[in-house]
Amino acid sequence: MSPAPKDVLGYKPPDGGWGWMVVFGAHISIGFAYSTPKALSIFFKEIQMDLGASYSEIAWISSIMLAVMYAGGPVSSVLVTRFGSRPIVMTGGLMCGVSMATASFGSSIIYLYFCIGIIGGCGLSLNLNASLTIISKYFLVKRPLANGLAMAGSPVFLCFLAPVNQYLLARFGWRGSLLILGGMMLNCCVAGALMRPVTPPDKWTSFAPQTKVEQPNEHNTKIKRNFGRNAKKFLDLSFFKDRGFVIYLIGNVMFIFGAYAPIVFLSAYAINQGVEKYSAAYLLSIMGFVDMFIRPATGLIANSKWIRPRIQYFFSFAMVFNGTCHLLCPLIKSYVFLVVYAAFFGIGFGMVFALIFECLMDLMGSQRFPSAVGLVTIVECFPMLLGPPAAGLLVDVFGDYKYLFFMCGSVIMTGGLFLFVMNIYNYHMLDKEKAAKNNEQGQKDTENQDQEKAASWIWCLRDYTIFRECLTLYAQVLG
Amino acid sequence: MKLLWAVSALLLSCWRTDASTAPNIVTEPHEVSNQTSAVLSCNLTDSSLLIKGSYWTLNGNILEDSVSADDSPFTVHRLDKITHSNSGTYECVFKTEPQVKQTIEVKTLPHVVAYKHSEHGNENDKGVMVCVGHGHPLPTDWGWFKEEDGNRKQILNGTGDKYEIKSTPNKTTLTINELSIQDDIGDYTCLGTNELGPGSDKIHLRVRSRLAALWPFLGIVAEVIILVTIIFIYEKRRKPDEVNDDDDSGSAPLKSNSTANHKDKNVRQRNSN
């Protein structure tokens, strides 16, 4: 079960050293990307009172921000391939900071949609894609661990931003808080500055099996010529011909559809079961806290020599685990067991998210990863936006939360099992293709060897002839 | 003789109807006003009706611990401590056919509480302060006052565009438009009055300057610029070292890409001859 081929970088990734600073930068960048849309909801009540809008109108701000962040994937892929990660993350951080700062002066809900939702969302999408790409450039052997550490940014920042936002809101009001939050997001520029591009020295390229390598000069001129062509194909649909990619995409879509609804409805479900309001809110904090530690731990486990070759199976296991948690939830009635459920939910959720991009890197390789991740995020936009409302509809129709958990659990579990089965099939086909290729190569090799042998005999003969001629001449001279 | 029987039958029936239409409940006391404790009692004086039990209600809600199946015409409800939460309209109800009941009103001073004792507003924005009234009877009159140099200055509704007061019996809202830091910071008192007297609470209003958040923001921007500069300077200084490092690690590919090199080596060796 070797990892999928096409991982030919052309150079040996550092796998450490400055790479850990890059992971730290990615941690900050990804942290802001995932936690900001959620943390903003703390301001909604005050904004609602001030601007006189309804709660659903205000809630759209978060949804627009998340949707733009995911939909902007392909654009950000093209930019990252063209310019590298560092300028993109710095631009993204600047956009986010400016968006929040300008939003603080807003006086209409449409203005907030535009500033926070669209501009902020674009900034975050640049951040996300570029951070993931630079990890794949810096790490190969320790890549799962690096991914786990970077993705841990999301729960860490959520735990950090939630109380900070509360404090800022009380002290400065929502306008001042947005201004200061914008300032904090400028720290993504610092994260971007840490993302030094990997530039191998020129002499390495002569040994590289292919010339499509990270040489900045050659790369730039080549890409400049192709930029016109690339710009036309933002959505590189040739990815859909890749079997592994399609399998991954289907499994992921199923996961994302069922993943977010339990988070949205967990406290409502707990209150429905008779739990007190504050204790219900604690459940989400427990989940986030567990998530924080599980992601790096999963990265470490995935990096071990037993799991790394079979990482796609580990990913499907994590999804099945998550689905099982949700399916068992409606059987729980007491608060203590709800806490246990929240902890296991955190474990499952963290495991999946630590591996979600590592598996894509494993499938696609570092060269194709930026475009692949852009395509994946734009496709994932739809289940992410449709999942919670669909679940909410189930609750409204049946009046019981258990159907929500059944639906989410079964969808996620089906996705996990689908990935497991299809990956077995995919690896089987890959092994067959590899064997066929080896046979071809073997035939070519024997042909080459025969040719070489003939060539060396000819040289031998020529040397011998020359040698004999010299001897004859010498004899003539002497004799 | 027949006339005598008719008259006495008429008198009897009148007396009987009198008895069934006017059961008299004597309440003690009739009304409770501004007392710390009380004992409410009801005495059903006309005992011709069958009493299956009795209970008390407060504002229409049955008090569970007062329900009794006793057939006594005398029922008692104790109020050891009268606060705004147990003041209201009490009714003693006797389970008879038909039901009979009598009302005792327990009145207290209004209990006035502010939603938040410390309110914030932004400069040039509007500030809202809310007070809620509890108890029975609810305040009929609400007033807002501003503490100024130890004196209370009444705020009147519609004084220019600045002050707006909206009041209902259980809630009053004071809205101050165009908050200014010099004039509007301070303590505000809401006063609710009912027939027994007043109740009040105090709210402290803080006005945040528009620029209050600007200083932390500029501080963070400065920190970001400094960090980015440090990172770039560190990188520029490292560059000469980096070239040396790469020379050392450049030997690694020579060892790893074995097959390619063997081919090259062979070709090169032959070519050199």
Image (spheres, rainbow, N blue to C red):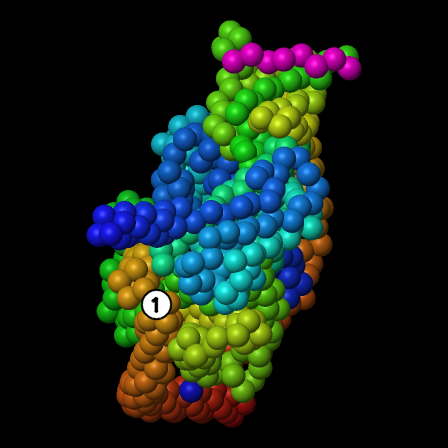
Q: Nearer the viewer, residue B22 or B188?
A: B22
* Number of numbered discs overlaid on the protein picture: 1
Q: Nearer the viewer, residue A233 or A11?
A: A233
Q: Specify whether residue B53 is in view.
A: yes
**Which residue is painted at 77% across and 15% down in the image?**
B150
**Which residue is painted at 53% across and 46% down in the image?**
B26
Provide the secondary structure element on which disc 1 rests.
loop
x%, y% of residue B141? 54, 22
- Judging by the rendered image, the residue that carries numbered circle 1 is A400
Q: Chain of mark 1?
A: A
x%, y% of residue B188? 66, 22
Q: Amino acid at mark 1?
A: Asp
In the image, is residue A240 above or below residue B120? below
Q: For the magenta stretch, what is the residue range?
A: B150-157
**Which residue is painted at 43% across and 49% down in the image?**
B23
Residue farthest left in this picture? B2
Q: Give the main secondary structure, helix, strand or loop, of the magenta stretch.
A: strand
Q: Nearer the viewer, residue A352 or A330?
A: A330
Residue farthest top in this picture? B160
x%, y% of residue A401? 37, 67
